Amino acid sequence: MSLNATPAGERVHIAFFGRRNAGKSSLVNAFTGQDLAIVSHVKGTTTDPVYKAMELLPLGPVQIIDTPGIDDEGELGALRVKKTRQVLNRTDLAILVADSTQPLGRTEEELLALIKDRGIPYLLAFNKADLLESVPEAGENTLWVSALTGLHIHELKEKVAALAGQEGPGRPLIADLLSPGDTVVLVVPIDKAAPKGRLILPQQQTIRDVLEAGAAALVCRDSELAQTLAGLPGPPRLVVTDSQVFGKVAKIVPREVPLTSFSILMARYKGDLPLTVAGANAVRDLKDGDGVLIAEGCTHHRQCEDIGTVKLPRWIGEATGAAPEYTFCSGREYPEDLTPYKLVIHCGGCTLGEREMKCRQRAAADQGVPITNYGILIASLNGILERTLEPFPEFAGLQKG
């Protein structure tokens, strides 16, 4: 992916579901105009979800997902169906592909009910319409198409763009906290975990949102922060820091200057901030042997001082004196059953979509398991959580930790 490409987490996720041999993968190829998915007359050709980033005008950047058949059989088939259902967690718009020459089956009806229960916008695309003597009129959520002849593929794209566009963007990352002409200081440590030659995604996104607000972004390392603040003609509107240096930065930034972190901005941007703030309290109740899940949305090569596997467990041990049992997961392998854990600690989720991030949080809440965020937890452990929430007017009354 190029440096200017839209991150997957910021794209609208459009997933195609259907029974085996309904022509789902053929329809995906017709929709994208590319041979994205392998197609054949053999049922079950698609064995794992296939992802493709593309531009869908006038909607913009989207992520297309082709899934295995929802009626797959056997032990391996059950795993494929499970993966298909997991895709729903990150789906912003579902397209259920059915064979127009056959009635809807029970598996399709069940999946459609699941899509509706989750509040996911959907379209029911009846494929192979070229085999019908007459093609029915399209409905609000239904359309008869043919991947073979291209019938109504353009109309399908238009319906998808219209439905997905209704979702609209979420709240700004930081722009709503700023006014034109403001200065924001962004503290970016350059250590062994920092990617060589570039900034990590939340830092890039924050800079872009600051510019969108007509404000100025001043970037420095924690080692130059004091000098940078002293050189300003007045106090900055806001200081945003990498959570790993929260303790150091909080001592440098004057108390009257608002302070928060990239991770907390992401918690507000993509998730339920009050839920993750409340979850931070649970760390104080941890005991030896308690299960703690530390989850990250992406996969990366872990360094010797990795924040998730090394620093957070160390800081928790120092703050609580407890020795919990830690489990680590990354990427899309997020457990469905969270009940073995007393606490879930999640990264900012910059590579995840808003729907998937909230789905993970909701799963924890539904199972009665507290969930928090890297930055929120680190602020709590440093005794500065209340201060780091002050920049957000809607959460000014929150005082946890």
Image (cartoon, helix red, strand yellow):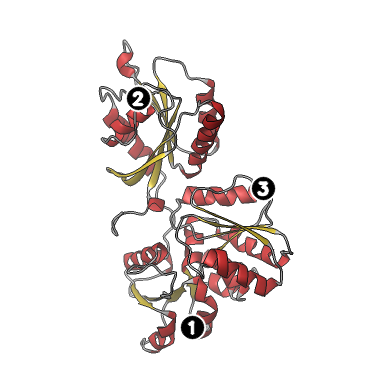
Q: Quadrant of the N terminus?
A: bottom left
Tag shown at residue 337: none
What's the residue type where badge 1 is placed? Val
- Please name the residue that numbered disc 2 is placed on: 40
Q: Position of residue 291 (x, y in %)?
A: 68, 57
Q: Which element carries disc 2, helix, strand or loop?
A: loop
Tell whether label 1 touches label 3 (CB within 8 Å). Answer: no
- Callout in the foreground (3, 2): 2
Structural distance between the alpha carbons of marks 3 and 1: 39 Å
- Please name the residue that numbered disc 1 is placed on: 253
Q: Quadrant of the C terminus?
A: bottom right
Tell me which corner region of the image, top left, top right, bottom left or bottom right, holds residue 315. bottom right
Q: Position of residue 242 (x, y in %)?
A: 47, 72
- Please name the residue that numbered disc 3 is placed on: 367
At 67% across and 48% down in the image, what residue appears? 367
Query: Within 10 angstroms of label 2, few (less than 14), some, or many (20 or more) residues?
Result: few
Tell whether label 2 touches label 3 (CB within 8 Å). Answer: no
Q: Is residue 335 above or below residue 18?
A: below
For marks 1 and 2, the one nearer the N-term is 2
At 39% across and 62% down in the image, what residue appears? 201
| Front residue of 24 and 133 | 24
Structural distance between the alpha carbons of marks 1 and 2: 62 Å
Tell whether label 2 touches label 1 (CB within 8 Å). Answer: no
